Amino acid sequence: MKRKLTQQELHNLAMNIVGKDLEKRGFEFIAINSQLKKHPQFVCIDDKNQRYFVIVRFNTIDNFPVDYDVIWMETFKNHAKKNNAKVLFAGLGLGSIDNETKYPNLDEDYLLKYEGLQDLAIELN
């Protein structure tokens, strides 16, 4: 019988996808936080020692692109600025092979829409 993935399992799946992308781009991980709704999910540095805070969010593919609360993000950018970090946002669309409006089930292939990391300017609006 099919079992739906929990929100935490979906979050972990999204983080694994983004983590592999970060590795491929040469980032080195300083800290990883996989707890749901705790930000940032990744703290990493590039080859020039620039620190990055990476936020991972997901939704169903039919609700792609994934957005974020602009007011909350301005507060988070301020936190990043105080820590000499840049902010990267990773929005992912996840879907079931059978129905893209639903999340994938455990141990099944899934649909993915991911357009890469989005650099969010630190300058406060």
Image (cartoon, rainbow, N blue to C red):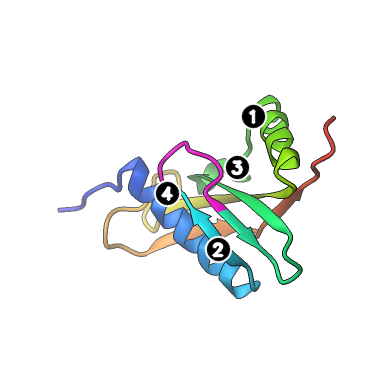
Label 2 neighbour load within 10 Å: few <14, some 14-19, many 20+: some
Badge 2 vs badge 3, beta-carbon distance below 8 Å: no
What's the amino acid at mark 1? Asp
Q: Which residue matches tag 3?
A: 66
Q: Nearer the viewer, residue 3 or 81?
A: 81
The answer to which image quadrant residue 28 occupies is: bottom right
- Mark 2 element type: strand
**Which residues fall within the magenta stretch?**
34-42
Disc 3 marks which amino acid? Val
**Residue carrying label 4:** 34
Residue with the most extreme left position:
1
The residue where tag 1 is placed is 69
The spot of residue 52 in percent (x, y) is 67, 54
- Tag 1's secondary structure? loop
Front in this rendered view, residue 112 or 101:
112
Query: Percent x, y for residue 30?
Result: 55, 59
Residue type at numbered disc 4: Ser
Task: Tell me the residue at 74%/60% (across/down).
Answer: 50
Q: Looking at the picture, does residue 30 appear above or below residue 34?
A: below
Q: Earlier in the sequence, mark 2 or mark 4?
A: 2
Query: Which x, y percent locates residue 47?
Result: 72, 72
Residue, disc 2: 29
Report the residue at 55% width, 63% height from top: 29
Dot 1 or dot 4: first in sequence order is: 4
Is 47 left or right of 22, judged from the image as shown?
right
Separation of marks 2 and 4 at Cα, in angstroms:
13 Å
Alpha carbon separation for disc pair 1 and 2? 26 Å
Mark 4: few/some/many CA within 10 Å (<14, 14-19, 20+)? some
Q: Earlier in the sequence, mark 2 or mark 3?
A: 2
